Amino acid sequence: MKRLISLLPVLTLLGILWTLPTACTDEQTQLGNNISGSDALYEGRTHTLYADRALSVRDDSLMTTGYNAYNTHGIIGNYHDAIFGKVSSTLYTQIALPTNYSSINFGEMTIDSVVLTLVKEHLYPDKEATYNFHFEVMQLAEALQSDTFYYSNHSLAVNPAGCFYDGDVSVSASDTVIRIPLGNGIADVLRQTATSEEFIQTTKGLRVRLTDAGSEGMMTINFAATKTCLSVYYRYRAEDTVSSRYVFLLGTGTTRFTQFIHDYSGSTTGGADSIPGNTTLYIEPLAGYSILLSFDSAIRAFAAEHPMATIHHAELLLPVADEADNMKPDQMLARHATGNQNYVADLLDLYTLTGFDGKYDDSRHCYRLRLTQHVQSLLRNGSDEGTLILLDSRQSSAARTVLKGITGTDRVRIEIVYTE
């Protein structure tokens, strides 16, 4: 007790010293104001890093199968605009037995109807509009292989005699589940006795797409929802008056992939593999464009002048161009451009931190992405080999945008708070 009492004057002095202001001698003296959310202020000097190189680069080798625990959404449809041209998205999926079934005995069943149901999440480009989509559902000519990874530029042939649906379906903002009654032909495909593996190989799978015969637009599908499935209504005997329901898996629980086809003819981007980003940068989902940034000159200069700097906060600001449309992407992510191309370390804390972590800030008209650990790592290495900026929902949302480049007053930059 006596030792504790003797320490009180020292602790009081330390408390007073702790409250004294920290000196700031760099470009700005405000403590992190306007850099982060209102719930986080950082004491230290502020500095701005400007990019010396930026490109919009094609992302045409996107893997769209696997990782079902995270890749729970997909998209189908067609859309075009003057900047990015036309894009279409097509779904290829297995039909599988429920996960707890190892076989099926449907060979003698009377099938009354088969209904494909898709849980709709979003509509694009007008989420409040009603679309008259023209659905086409075809049987595949070859089976999707469960041990194969499929990419956005893959496709599979269809059975020309296996058209199970070809017609219009009205889809509005208020619709949550889209029901598509399939033709009698699919009953012959499903009416079999087989193991789960044999069933997948025999049924082949489905290609589901929206054709140009209907409204232009795109629909995001939730594959993790239990109502995204194939329902079969059947009777054990033809004379039975009550049908039973059997649910086959589509999407999650099966092998599936989406194919993205781009036509940049006559568009602003023109489909070039890379576009210099001095004045304008383009970022597009569905295997479209990502953005490559390098702050190498700024990193080298800062590291040389401040070799002992500790970064307390770093935030990448991506100003949105005037020509961008109103339906902006939800979130942007950052990944290393070289080596294993893993996501930057800050993304490990993405869903636990508050603030504008890759989200659009309407008050500042820019996307804001926290890169504190990433910038510290770049300074430790003394150089920047490049960072890729891409969209979080690039497999399941058609929202794209246009950003300002690396020149001009309101340009791409990283604002940091540091001490040394």
Image: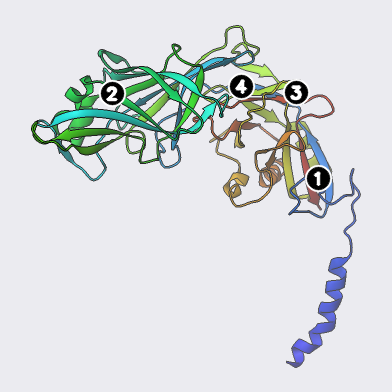
Q: Which mark is residue 57?
A: 4
Mark sitting earlier along the chain (1/3): 1
Residue 130 rendering spot, x and y as whole percentages: 51, 24
Residue occupied by mark 2: 182
Q: In what element is the residue under mark 1? A: loop
Assess whether mark 4 and mark 1 are in contact (beta carbons under 8 angstroms).
Answer: no
Could you say which disc has been placed on residue 334 in the image?
Answer: none
- Mark 4–mark 3 distance (CA, rounded to whole Å): 21 Å
Q: Amino acid at mark 1?
A: Asn
Q: Which residue is mark 1?
A: 34
CB-based contact (under 8 Å), mark 4 and mark 3: no
Report whether 207 appears left or right of 72. Answer: left
Q: Are marks 2 and 3 in contact (CB under 8 Å)?
A: no
Q: Which residue is mark 3?
A: 322
Residue shown at 58%/32% (left/top)? 391
Say left or right for 279 vs 186: right
Between the residue at mark 1 and the residue at mark 4, the CA separation in whole angstroms equals 31 Å
Q: Which picture quadrant has residue 338?
A: top right
Query: SS for tag 3?
Result: loop
Question: At numbered mark 2, what does the secondary structure look like: helix, strand or loop?
Answer: strand
Q: CA distance from mark 2 to mark 3?
A: 45 Å
Query: Of the residues under marks 1 and 4, which one precedes in the sequence?
Result: 1
- 171 vs 373: above or below: above
Closer to viewer: mark 4 or mark 2: 2
How many other residues sit within 10 Å of disc 3, few (<14), some (14-19) or many (≥20)? few
